[in-house]
Image: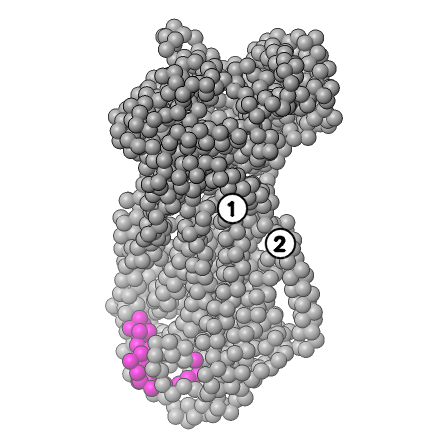
Amino acid sequence: MQESDDFVDNAAPPTFNSRTMQEEEKKVDDADNTPDVEKAVVTPFDAIRASENDENRKKSCWSDERGNLKVVNMVVRNPCKIFWLIIVLVLVLTFILNAAVFRTAENGNPFTLPGNEFDLMDVRSIQYDSMRLASDQVKGAREAMGMEGTTTLKQSQLEAIQYWVFEATTPNGLFGDEQSIQAMKDAYDIFLDDPGYKDYCLFNYPRNRSLITENTTVECTVPITPLLMYYASYWDPDAVAEVIEELKNPVNVEVLNKVGVCANPLAFCPPQIEETFTFQEKIYAMQFGFKVVNITSTWDMKGDLIDNITQATELASYLVLADAYAGAVDFGFDQSFSVDNPSSQYSRGILFWGGPYSNRNTSGLSEEEAREVKKADDDRLKNYILDNYLEKMDKQSDLNTHATINSYYFMTAIIGDVILDIVTQDGLLALFSFAFVFCWIRLNTASWFLAFVGFFEIFFSIPVAWFLFTVVFQIKYFSTLNTLALFIVAAIGADDIFIFMDAYKQSQYHLDVLTDLETRMSWVYRRTGTAMAITSATTCAAFLCTLITPLSSIQSFGIFAACVILIDYVLVMSLFCTAVVIYHDRFESRAKCGCCCPCGVQNPTSVTEKAKAAIEANGGNEMKRDRVSEFFRTKVSSFVQKPFNRLLLAVVFLSWVSVSIWQATKIEPTKENEQFLDENHPLQKSVTILDKEFPTANDDLGMKVYYAWGLGLVDRTGVNRLLEPDNFGVPTFDSNFDFNAQCQVELLNFSDRLKTDPKYKGLIKRKNGVGQVYSFLEELAAFNVYGNLNNCTEVKKGDWRSADWQIDTADLPEMMPKFLEEKTCFADDGETVGGRYSKELGWDGKTLKYAAISAESDKLDPFGRDSEFLTRKEYDQFILLAAEADELVSVHCSGSVIMTDLDEKFVFMNNQSIYVQTAIQSSILGVCIAFIVLLVSTRVFHIALFASLSITCVLISVVGTMVMLGWYLGSIESILIGIIAGFSVDYVVHLAHAYEIASGDTYERITEAFGDLGISVFNGMITSVVASIPLFFCQLQFFAKFGTFLCLTIAFSWIFANFGFMSLLAQLKIPVKSGKVCSL
């Protein structure tokens, strides 16, 4: 018995019986369809690839005189030293990774923040970054000159919003009975009845801040909700009835919409609009407007529920007909609400939370200091809401609280905590997956030691691959998609462990390899090394197919996943191989319940010697194997070999693939916003209702589309986001841009046109009949005439237009500092000019680098991700508008207009197209690469072809099933389809390789392939399928869909590999000829 920690075989090297060798070689040479035995091992690949029947190997740089691999000999003789060396190396690399990545990451977050993800060479991304980077640069220049620091009054800025979303449970709708209306009022009373609410609400300051003193009483901004009307402090039913009667006349409604903004004596009326109506029509519209104002002025939610709720609902249904007055009611009623259907099944409302919580001046604060101050305010508000309101809000949203309504809330201040709770819960579900993987490994290895080592190598494949990815390759872009590598390596890593362990177990039935442990482990190493090298190479190559996409996040994921698969293979062939040697030497024959420790006492008698003695005692006959292996070797193999069964399988497979092809051709890009959570989650429910059930209201925030002059195209020279995630290029400016008097006139005319031209209705969002357009030139011109913006009536009416308002650019350096600090006349919350036009005004403190006008989209909002179908429809119209802008303005301002949004809607629209292209291209390329790898490794054309056909069937089946499940082709689905090839190669490649290296005719090869790898492939399938099941219950849709995708891909891969691929081989019986580089 050896006392050292390392097992060393002191016995003399065994000699081979020459007669036995000749008999075995004759069997090989005489067998039909079998390859010749190679006489020498000359390359590392050949050293691993040589089959277990090759006993005639010559000594080479890779093998000794007995044909055993030298690296395996070293492992067998020094297992503990190598084992602990690898463990230490893995831990050291993990420590270096922690120091290089986690300790230097911002806020400890190693992931590249999502956003700004696009094709750098696409015209939309170029225009987006041209505007975004330029506006950031000029704003930074202004801040450096101290032009951005202002005093902010207590609770004067919007800190957070609170959405209440209501759903009726009765046909009467939400406003059909007092019970439902009062139930909605209860939701708002949670805050409005709390005295502490005033310490956190958004204050409604008077616009003239100079009138504010310490004794000034400031009220909270009232919520936006139709309940303002139902709980008005005064309700005049006669006045309301009169307005309703007037609106019942279609002619009156037509006049009101024709006069539009001109009915407001405080608004500018463009001459071209004024020409479309008579003076009498204008007088009527103005008189009607006074009636409406008298009614709505008491809508303050301070009274009791009015007596005639039906009349209030009727008034709302008629007011939405008049563009100038729809804004008073349209926000809280759903899109089916109308005169003909005065019932709303859905409603919504917003409360406003303000900050900061004391008067504050940000001058002199660095960006980091300002961020810390803002975070302190955010935390204070969040904690107050969690401590005082959350329980009541949850009670209100409980489905059992109210009989006639369901309530949902969405609050920006606590959304991060809600999402964190969801991620935590989903993370716990993922732990069940990993726990199952561990338990299944333990069950199949029958050793706690091997189970822990196996799980260790699976888990630490991630940090070691991360080290290779970040430290060695210097790739800094680490996508959140990379978290999927955990599930990928859990599935593939466990599969590799099963392959290696089952080969080790099967080696005890082969007398010719039981000479000693070195010979036995060389056989295991060769047998498994080739199979896993082929599958790992194919899988890595399939994941690297993602490099064809221009999106950095998917590129990062593909490279990282390939690194993980590579490292997992290396660790299985090194660490786990060493662990198996230790297990053999010390614990296998006497382990109780599989318990063992790597520091245990070495067995006095080799398990290999016992296995050899058992075979010899059995007269050299084949030993009985475990039941599962025998099942695959006999039952499954014989099932595939029966012609009738193959015919039945062919009918089933052809029928299924035909249906799948039919379904796959019906897949469509999504036409709706992609869901983030499960459709029944309250948060997702509120988002879905907000997205689908309401029209664009006056108080909705539309996505701003910018038209800018003076910008050049961003310089992308040297940009590589994988290596420098924050480098998008350098903004450039058009040196020919000329902000002359005529340029200013045309910019103002273009702005007026966007506001009032009826042809833009439906494209540009309107509020009270006027397009929502942001033009700093209106206020700059008024400031140039008046010297200030104190009289907003004059500014809005446009009286300054009759004066000489054009700005001399030489006066801008003197004007701009004061102008930027003025309060804008086009916002009610005391916003400064610099804040309102922060993107449109390209003033860098010295010169006007660019000038922009923006307009809010009627269909697109700055939140969420709309479908490509909707976004492209709007984008095409804004492109046509850009052509008009070029024709009208560019000739006078010099240079072309750049049209873009800054909410990434247009670039994401292109991303969705890229997702579809990538899914198709990656799938096709993945199958092609799998075919090439299989052809090179097996050197048998028909095996490579049939295996690739199996992978293609898996691809078609998964896509067809996705359509059957009601999935559309969104970003999640496209990414998953793109990696199907990477997931589906393992099983068919294992069986293909086992079939190729087997001996005998077709049926004998099939029997041997099933006997050797049937159980391994089955264990891999069970591990992956069962581990994916907990993901079905995740709230996050990405992980829920990934779980479904993983289950489908693995299940179809196993079915087609075992019963499709092997049946095809059995049916065609194409011989595997020897002595050819590529045999047919």
Q: Is the residue 178 above or below the residue 569 in the image? A: above
Q: Is the residue 252 above or below the residue 646 in the image? A: above
Q: Residue at x 38, y 60 (%)?
A: 563
Horizontal arrangement in the rendering, residue 137 relative to residue 26 (left or right): left
Which of the two residues, 87 or 439, is positioned nearer the viewer here?
A: 87
Q: Residues within 10 Å of mark 1 (few under 14, many from 20)?
A: many
Residue 167 percent across, percent down from the top left: 64, 29
Residue 458 percent across, percent down from the top left: 40, 58
Residue 699 percent across, percent down from the top left: 55, 25
Residue 11 percent across, percent down from the top left: 29, 80
The residue at the far top in this view is 215
Horizontal arrangement in the rendering, residue 1063 relative to residue 373 (left or right): right
Q: Residue at x 44, y 24 (%)?
A: 778
Residue 1010 visible in the snapshot: no
What kind of residue is marked 2? Ile
Residue 90, by quadrant, is bottom left
Q: Is the residue 676 above or below the residue 333 in the image? A: below
Q: Nearer the viewer, mark 1 or mark 2?
A: 1
Tell me which secondary structure the magenta stretch mostly adopts.
loop
Residue 919 belongs to magenta span = no
Residue 809 visible in the snapshot: yes
Q: Are marks 1 and 2 in contact (CB under 8 Å)?
A: no
Residue with the mark numbered 2: 667
- Start-end of magenta stretch: 51-76
Residue 71 belongs to magenta span = yes
What kind of residue is marked 1? Met
Horizontal arrangement in the rendering, residue 446 relative to residue 94 (left or right): right
- Label number found at residue 909: 1
Q: How many labels does the image show?
A: 2
Cα distance in 3D space between marks 1 and 2: 18 Å
